[in-house]
Amino acid sequence: MTQVLRSFAVIRRRSMALLVLVLSACGGSGGSDATPTVPVTPAPTTGALTVTIASPGGAAVQVTGPASYSRALTATETLSGLTPGAYSVVAASVNSATYDYAPTAAQQQATVVAGATATATVTYAATTGALTVSIGGLPSDRAGSAVVTGAGVTNTLTATGTVARLAPGAYTITVTPVSDVSLRYAASTRTVTVSAGATASSAVTYALPIGARTSTDRADDTGGNQLKVLYALPSDGVDRGLDTLGVLQRSVSAWQRWLSAQTTGRVLRLDTFGGGLDVQFVRLPRTDAVYRAYGALIRDSIEKDLTSAGVSANSLKLYLTYYDGGHIDRCGSAAYPPLLPGRVAAIYLQGTIAGGPNCNTNAFAATPTSAPGYIDFVGAHETMHLLGLVSAAAPDHGFTGHTITDPNDLMYAGTAPWTPSKFDQPRRNYFSLTAFPAGILNFATSPFVILQ
């Protein structure tokens, strides 16, 4: 027991000494604080790369580098966390709907350093251009044909449009003529220069050819029976140039287009030269007063003078004569075979009508595709008489060569005002797609008629 107490006292003395030592170290008078430790920042191990892309029409850039790195870019971007080393920046050509674009440098290198940002710039420029072709002047139901050729390529446009991504250089626009109601619209060939990054333009305007004045019947474009148009003046008549200004061409086209719509595409074969209406100019031997003095026989006198001059000598042709002179009581008359033999119809452009407006107050069709007016319908009406229409055996025939039931019918003649807008709508008098009884002539089967 005494030994145990002695040991405990030794231990207690040692503990107290240790406590005094610790307290002295923690802050007795004359002591000092310890210096703190500063943390160390690790050195950077990666870098970055900014790729600047300048392009007016898209980009395709591929960045590759160490550790199988690969990244596709289409716009400016900074790539971070890159392993230091050499990076390849490869740019490919791109295209838009209009132009192609190529980089000024297809490939470049950039070195990425740890802790820094490298840079690379990719610039694109257009390598092709475009050409817009405006096509106009055609009837709305007819398609054009403009063939663009150059630099080994050929493109065909049927309406206004743009040919894109063309190599810079000269291009030829060749216009194919377009047929309509026996006439042919045409436009000239032209050359256009295309530059990279720009859209050139060219207007193709179709028009009916208007030939120089001719006093002869020029070579026909086609054979067969056909209607020839004459512009005739009395010896003292004022020349208004209706043949060289395109007035008669517009008039004939207007009523032919109306006729086509009424007959599901059937029109008269016209006498044409180079695709245009071959209008023959004739200066007749008598004065306007002399012709007027013949009264109801004016047309016969005009045909006699045309025959004597050899103008109406072709037996395969009928002659629609726009006579720029007067008549005592009408705007037109025609032969009506076999009852009234002949091959000439006359439109009296200076004619007078008792109780009605003078013939020259009626305007011609403004364009080849306009709805025909009164004087244009007169041309169509008199031409039907030259074909022998309307037959006396037709159900609604009344006055010689005319129908009497509907004032809207082209071939009407009666007491009501004539307001033409129909072409034998009953389909029983002079036009039908089925056969008529014997003795009734049918416009559809005339040798002068073609299906366009």
Image (cartoon, rainbow, N blue to C red):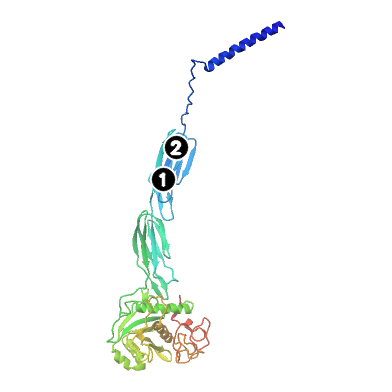
Percent position of residue 75, x then y: 44, 46
Vertical placement of residue 31 versus 124, above or below: above
Is disc 1 placed on a helix, strand or loop? strand
- In the rendered image, the quadrant that contains the N terminus is top right
Q: Name the residue under label 2.
A: 48
- In the rendered image, the quadrant that contains the C terminus is bottom left
Percent position of residue 290, x then y: 30, 92
Percent position of residue 443, x then y: 47, 83
In the rendered image, which quarter is residue 303 located in? bottom left
Question: Furthest residue to the right?
Answer: 1
Residue 53's disc number:
1
In the rendered image, which quarter is residue 232 located in? bottom left
Is disc 2 placed on a helix, strand or loop? strand
Vertical placement of residue 348 versus 163, above or below: below
Judging depth in this view, the residue of 277 and 163 nearest the camera is 163
For the residue marked with disc 1, what is the amino acid?
Ile
Q: Is residue 269 at least partly visible in the picture?
A: no
Question: Furthest residue to the left?
Answer: 236
Tell which circle, 1 or 2, labels the residue nearer the N-terminal end. Answer: 2
Q: Is residue 424 at least partly visible in the picture?
A: yes
For the residue marked with disc 2, what is the amino acid?
Ala
